[in-house]
Image (spheres, rainbow, N blue to C red):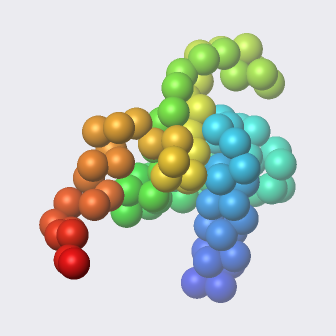
Amino acid sequence: MDSKTYQSQIKRVFKAFKEKPKTRLQVAQECGILRGNVCYFVRDLKKRKQIAVIRTGKDPITRHKSEFLSTDPDLFPPEMQKELFEGETDAV
């Protein structure tokens, strides 16, 4: 995958996860991107702490247990929200 394709697809994946918590398969079908690529992008976003597992539950497509992820920081678990602001100080 070339750099331009990577950037285009990861942006679409990021936006799709920001709308509401979704599974990787939901995003793959919504965006028309292969699920393997979505998993690859999720890995990269996790490394950057830009995505979090919000809950686990039954995937509406496969009916199997799955992770529902989001890129919306307001939905991140409290322990992860603290990590987002580590090292920052309140300057007055």
> 84 or 63, which is in the foreground?
84
On the rendered image, what quadrant is the C terminus found in?
Answer: bottom left
Residue 18, horizontal then vertical, whole percent: 65, 53
How many callouts does the rendering have? 0
The answer to which quarter of the image holds residue 77 is top left
In this picture, is 68 found above or below 80?
Answer: above
Which residue is at a point 70% across and 22% down the rendered structure image? 59
From the viewer's perspective, tell me whether residue 55 is left or right of residue 62.
Answer: left
From the viewer's perspective, tell me whether residue 46 is left or right of residue 67.
Answer: left
On the rendered image, what quadrant is the N terminus found in?
Answer: bottom right
Residue 47, horizontal then vertical, whole percent: 35, 58
The answer to which quarter of the image holds residue 50 is bottom left
Which residue is at a point 57% across and 45% down the rendered structure image? 70
Residue 30, horizontal then vertical, whole percent: 83, 48
Which residue is at a point 65% across and 85% down the rendered structure image? 4
> 70 or 29, which is in the foreground?
70
* Residue 17 visible, this angle: yes
